[in-house]
Image: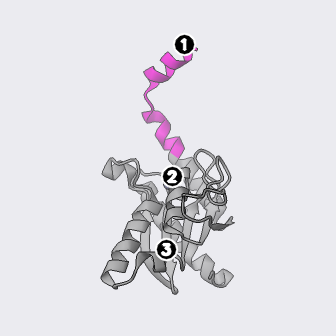
Amino acid sequence: MVGSVAETEAWMDQAVTMAKEALENGEVPVGCLMVYNNEIIGRGKNEVNETKNATRHAEMVAIDEVIEWCHEHNKEPKDVFAHTVLYVTVEPCIMCAAALRMMKIPLVVYGCQNERFGGCGSVLNISSATLADTGEPFQCIAGYRAEEAVEMLKTFYKQENPNAPKSKVRKKESSN
Ligand SMILES: [Zn+2]
């Protein structure tokens, strides 16, 4: 289902561009594409701050776009998702990994690990776990453009620190 290395690089290049846009918008820099029959049918970048909705991760935005595409093209989402590859700059989190299982996406190509929330091995292994009532496991190919993806995350979390509620942090520390 996955094309040549050059094709994969080209999809990941577009995902990286979307992650850069997210970073410029003050969002967690994650970008992704859903590719079906060699065509992009869904795109997403993290929109949590813009929408003030903690669930609007790149993957969730892209899933909604694919469902819309299916409606427009008179196709069953379950048939389309079963043949769709997700290209995403960062390992999907636990929530998104569970959503990908439920949609029965078979393959995810991603960049760097998600050490805080990763659902494909870093924190939990939702992607390959035996979960009878939660869709299907999916395969992962990791490491494409990982260094750039990590650099963007580092840049984001460095920017975030000055905005952290300092008094709360101090309170926490003193109560420990
Ligand atoms: Zn997520």
Residue 118 point in image, percent of width and height: 60, 51
- Say what secondary structure mark 2 lies in: helix
**Label 3 environment density (alpha carbons within 10 Å; few <14, some 14–19, many ≥20):** many
Q: What predominant SS class does the magenta segment belong to?
A: helix
Residues rendered magenta in the picture: 157-176
**Residue at horizontal 53 percent and vertical 43 percent from the top:** 157
The C terminus, quarter of image: top right
Residue 175 point in image, percent of width and height: 54, 12
User: In the rendered image of this protein, does residue 122 appear above or below residue 142?
Assistant: above
Tell me the quarter of the picture where residue 63 sits. bottom left
Callout 3, which amino acid?
Met
Q: Nearer the viewer, mark 2 or mark 3?
A: 2
Q: Nearer the viewer, mark 1 or mark 3?
A: 3
Q: CA distance from mark 1 to mark 3?
A: 47 Å
The disc placed on residue 124 is none
The N terminus, quarter of image: bottom right
Residue 153 point in image, percent of width and height: 56, 51
Q: Is residue 93 magenta?
A: no
Residue 80 point in image, percent of width and height: 47, 79
The disc placed on residue 95 is 2
**Residue at horizontal 40 percent and vertical 47 percent from the top:** 54
**Label 2 environment density (alpha carbons within 10 Å; few <14, some 14–19, many ≥20):** some
**Residue at horizontal 56 percent and vertical 63 percent from the top:** 89
Task: Tell me which label, 1 or 2, sits earlier in the chain.
Answer: 2
Classify mark 2 as within 8 Å of ligand 1 or not, answering yes or no.
Answer: yes
Mark 1, residue position = 174
Q: CA distance from mark 2 to mark 3?
A: 17 Å
**Residue at horizontal 52 percent and vertical 86 percent from the top:** 38
Mark 3, residue position = 34
Callout 2, which amino acid?
Met
Colour style of the rendered protein structure: one colour
